[in-house]
Image: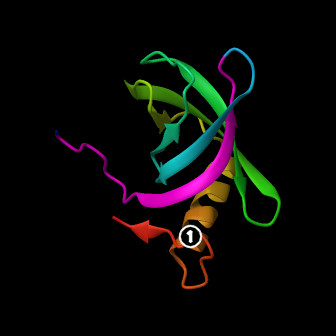
Amino acid sequence: MNDRRSQDRLDVSLDAVWDGHGNRPARITDLSEGGCFVDTSGEALIGERLTFRVEVPGGNSLELTGEVAHHMPPVGFGLRFIELSDEQREQLLSFLDYLKGPHDPIAATLR
């Protein structure tokens, strides 16, 4: 399989909720500046645009929008971030920097 990602991915385990015909619970298991993998039993179509909220340490959350790049039923789907505001991108980059730091309680590892 050809890995076309241009950003480093972090292995994570973050609670999330996405907007697929109502709020659906999920877990983000892979995160980068360009997208993430959403571990969920919910169905999504390739090309579908979704908004989701990721719970991050400290009681905060990130709200991001993406397009389904690939779907692996019943495991989940890969999401490519689109139309992020400057503020959303800045929050995402700050969170990724936090995860890469030595104080990371989630023990994310760069792959």
Q: Is residue 8 above or below residue 18?
A: below
Q: Is residue 22 above or below residue 78?
A: above
| Image height of 55 relative to 83, above or below | below
Percent x, y of residue 8 = 37, 60
Between 9 and 71, which is closer to the camera in this rendering?
71
Does the magenta-highlighted stretch encompass residue 104? no
Q: In this image, 17 relative to 43: left or right?
A: right
Q: Is residue 15 magenta?
A: yes
Q: Is residue 73 left or right of residue 5?
A: right
Residue 20: x, y in percent?
Answer: 65, 20
Q: Tell me what residue is drawn at x 56 percent, y 56 percent.
A: 13
Quick one: quadrant of the N terminus? top left
| Residue 11 picture quarter | bottom left
Name the residue located 66 percent from the left edge and 42 percent from the top edge: 85
Along the viewing direction, whichever of 47 and 71 lies nearer the viewer? 71
Q: Residue at x 25, y 43 (%)?
A: 4
Q: Is residue 94 left or right of residue 34?
A: right
Q: How is the image coloured?
A: rainbow
Determine the residue located farthest toward the right in the rendered image.
Answer: 59
Q: Disc 1 marks which residue?
A: 99
| Viewport quadrant of the C terminus | bottom left
Q: Amino acid at mark 1?
A: Leu
Residue 105 in picture, x, y percent from top left: 63, 76
25 versus 45 height, above or below: below
Please tell me which residue lies in front, 68 or 92: 68
Q: How many marks?
A: 1
Q: Which residues are magenta?
A: 2-20
Label 1: element kind: helix
